[in-house]
Amino acid sequence: MIASPDLTIRTGDTLPFVQQYLKNRDGTTFVIPVGTTVEFLYRTFAVPMDLVEVAGLVVTAATGLVRAQLNPVLPIAPGRYQAFWRLTLSTGDVISFPDGAYLWMQVTPE
């Protein structure tokens, strides 16, 4: 059985964004502390490249919901991408989700 992507978007969408509920290792909701900044980072599987960093935001702290607005001016080519969320707490501590892994983001053609 082939695994499904964690996130799927379509090339050419005029309002591309990704969002996800963050979970702790045990599967429980990660409650996002006040003052946390959010980034969404990704890179292609096909060709090694630097990580693309996109500012994100906390939608609902109590449910761990985060969102990032991708840049519609610089469309993402169709393909498979590694992605993760990076949160910087007000203390300066940094946490990545998923912990120790990557999300699979699939970008489909128009």
Image (spheres, rainbow, N blue to C red):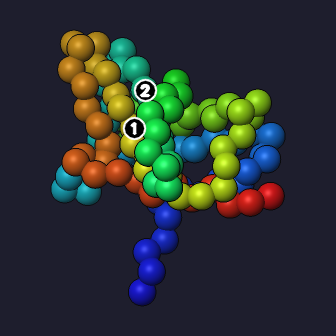
Of label 2 and label 1, which has the lower sequence position?
2
- Dot 1 corresponds to which residue? 85
Contact? badges 2 and 1 (CB < 8 Å): yes
Residue 6 pos. (x, y %): 47, 59
Which is more toward the observer, 32 or 86? 86
Q: Dot 1, crowdedness within 10 Å: few (<14), some or many (≥20)?
A: many
Residue 16: numbered disc? none
Residue identifier under label 2: 38
Tag 1's secondary structure?
strand
> On the image, which quarter does residue 62 sit in?
top left
- Counting from the top left corner in percent of width and height, residue 63 is at 40, 42
Q: Position of residue 102 (x, y in %)?
A: 35, 51
Instruction: Determine crowd level at label 2: few under 14, some 14-19, many 20+ residues with C-alpha closer than 10 A.
Output: many
Circle 2: residue type: Val
* Left or right side of 106 for 51: left
Give whichever of 21, 55 is nearer the camera. 55
Point out residue 93 in the picture as x, y percentages from the top left corner: 21, 20
Q: Is residue 47 among the parts visible in the rendering?
A: yes
What's the distance in space between the residues labelled 2 and 1, CA to CA? 7 Å
Is residue 24 positioned above or below 2 on the image? above
